[in-house]
């Protein structure tokens, strides 16, 4: 079987070795005569996997002491609600930096909760007016240092913008949605009070969300909510407050173990930089055909977006790419065009093949 | 490889054919050259699986017109919070029937939300005083017909009690947690306003929750909450409001397709009745050694609990069972003893083997 070149925006490609490992032991995990998904979440066999996955998050990201790591359910979208519920007290406010469709949604959900709780979710900066073609800078944000927290995202998958260096917005607690680029590059966790990420881009399958938070920030969370909505309760139960999504966490373990074997964040960052550089080089070398709307300093290394001169040409491009074994390249309906997702498991050879195809397509269309 | 006889309380055993199907296509789903978990949740390949799984829920349970079916994340425990958030308005009240540890938790979470929202979560009936050795009857419940809803569970996994016939408590909307016995027997969905169930007992792996609700009940839900917390939003998006737990839903599809092939609820109910009858017969035939604390009319066909005369004998029983390839039999720490979970995928031959072992153990201990 030929492996398809998968540029899906998420759920996206997973590393073949992580999948092959799962298949090999799918019916008989660790010699137990059953699948890992048939094990109780409270027995030693599963707990070893669970703790190894949590440990790999800590090890690969260099999570400092004083930080908690938990696996939750519901995706980043559930975090959009849980964050204000825990940390936006009645009368309090949060500052939102809006750089694309997802940070827009995060703000809308926080604003809904703020309406219920008698609090405020402010937009401190937004690049919406320019069509999200660059990320907002800290010096243009109208920040409130008394805010409960500042919320931004490191990368926006739909609009293809990314903070090449992760900024700090003022003096409030920094909260960051890193769903689409966590584990893709080195990271200073200590700059953040809380980081969260849906797994389905760089970490594993959909259905698992990683949260990394300063313990003293977690302790500030509201205490009168149902327990399942409180970070504190999940931390106290080591992500086993209720039945964890065990198979998803097991795949996360396999993926992170693969990443560790590859050399960790240093190695994957070099590889991801090279992949993105190769792709943007082809785009920029053919300005008559390919046009990336994103300002160079904000271009995402995870999701490269570009347009062709007409929707007809874009359709032809996508159809030919599919015939060449490359899928997942259609841009989000909100902005159209082409989107190339370049997550960790997207192999350098696939990007080379895509770049060659793009050159060839340009020559034939020129 | 010999398949272990798995009596885990959940996550529990899954049907071998459903797992074998998943393994066979693990790396190449439907000839696409990638795993089903690498597909976008918004492409046709995955959507066919998604819609088939939802359709099988409807078909097997005979879900009437006017009802919605959705897959959510977070387990039944998340429903403990989402239910009062949507349906317990400020000034409103809900009636809780408490028959074990899980309905106790459901009440505690509803009470927490009621405290935040200025509402009330009442206990209308509870068998806690008797140690949860039987289920509460409607005629002993102090019900409020003006309640927003009545909440109960059809089965309690820890205490091993079950409603053999599903009752109706008064005239308020009936809401039922069926996590541990849904799809185990025939069911009249039309008697309920909302049914929910974590998948990890009879339906699939952990990480997926099935919700079946009358559309007009869903529409009564509070509208000012963050969207991700509103049933309405998930219904409107066909369970694709955000990235669904795609692989989990795929396994649900495989499990329900297996159940359909077996003959559906009629066939599995006969099989489950026979399994439970065989097990309770052995318990009752050896009253000097095995004692089930649950009143006969409330004994669960999904989770049979019993004690031996001493913890030493229980330990010996469990150790010998393990050596004979039978696992997951240790009772929950709250009540100790032995628990035998008899979910759909627990094969009749395993129950026969366990019954033989129990007879033999009794003879040797007698």
Image (cartoon, coloured by chain):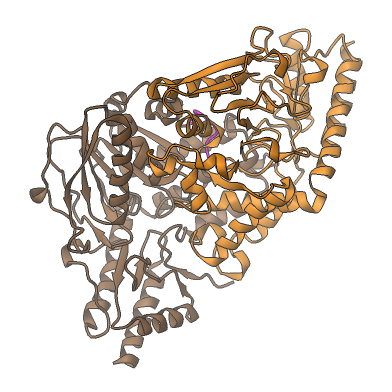
Chain colours: A orange, B brown
Q: Quadrant of the C terminus of chain B?
A: bottom left
Query: Residue A310, position in %: x, y?
Result: 75, 8
Asked if residue B201 is among those painted magenta in the image, a careful observer would answer: no
Is A84 displayed left or right of A3 in the figure?
Answer: left
In the image, residue A87 above or below residue A46: above
| Residue B207 in sight | no
Magenta part of the protein: which range?
Answer: B240-245
From the viewer's perspective, tell me whether residue A344 is left or right of residue B126.
right
Give the residue at the far left of this rendering: B139
Q: Is residue B117 left or right of residue A345?
A: left
Choose between B205 and A271: the one closer to the eye. Answer: A271
Quadrant of res A136: top right
* Magenta region, main secondary structure: loop
Asked if residue B279 shows in the view, the reply is yes
- List x then y, in percent, for residue B184: 32, 54
Where does residue B300 sit, x and y in percent of width and height? 26, 62
Q: Nearer the viewer, residue A239 or B164?
A: A239
The residue drawn where x is 53% and y is 41% is A218
Counting the numbered discs, the total is: 0
């Amino acid at each position: 079987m030929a492996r398809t070149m998968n540029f899906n925006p998420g759920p996206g490609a997973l590393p073949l070795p992580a999948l092959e490992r799962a298949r090999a032991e799918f019916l008989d995990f660790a010699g137990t005569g059953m699948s890992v998904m048939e094990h109780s979440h409270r027995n030693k066999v599963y707990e070893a996997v669970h703790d190894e996955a949590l440990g790999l998050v800590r090890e690969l990201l260099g999570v400092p002491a004083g930080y908690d790591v938990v696996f939750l359910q519901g995706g980043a979208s559930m975090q959009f609600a849980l964050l204000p519920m825990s940390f936006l007290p009645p009368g309090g406010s949060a500052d939102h930096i809006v750089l694309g469709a997802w940070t827009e949604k995060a703000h809308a959900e926080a604003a809904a909760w703020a309406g219920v709780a008698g609090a405020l979710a402010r937009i401190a900066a937004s690049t919406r007016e320019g069509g999200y073609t660059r990320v907002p800078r800290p010096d243009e944000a109208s920040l409130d240092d008394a805010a409960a927290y500042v919320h931004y995202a490191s990368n926006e998958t739909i609009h293809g913008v990314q903070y090449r260096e992760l900024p700090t917005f003022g003096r409030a607690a920094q909260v960051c949605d890193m769903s689409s680029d966590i584990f893709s590059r080195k990271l200073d966790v200590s700059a953040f009070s809380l980081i969260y990420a849906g797994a389905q881009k760089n970490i594993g399958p959909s259905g698992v969300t990683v949260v990394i938070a300063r313990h003293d920030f977690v302790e500030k969370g509201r205490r009168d909510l149902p327990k399942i909505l409180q970070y504190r309760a999940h931390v106290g139960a080591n992500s086993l407050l209720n039945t964890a999504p065990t198979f998803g966490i097991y795949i996360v373990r396999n993926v992170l173990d693969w990443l560790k074997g590859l050399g960790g964040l240093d190695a994957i960052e070099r590889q991801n930089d090279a992949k993105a550089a190769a792709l943007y080089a082809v785009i920029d070398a053919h300005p008559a055909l390919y046009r990336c709307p994103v300002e160079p300093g904000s271009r995402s290394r995870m999701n490269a977006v570009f347009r062709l001169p007409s929707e007809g040409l874009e359709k032809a491009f996508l159809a030919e790419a599919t015939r060449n074994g490359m899928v997942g390249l259609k841009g989000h309906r909100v902005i159209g065009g082409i989107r190339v997702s370049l997550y960790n498991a997207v192999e350098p050879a696939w990007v080379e093949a895509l770049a060659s195809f793009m050159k060839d397509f340009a020559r034939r269309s020129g």
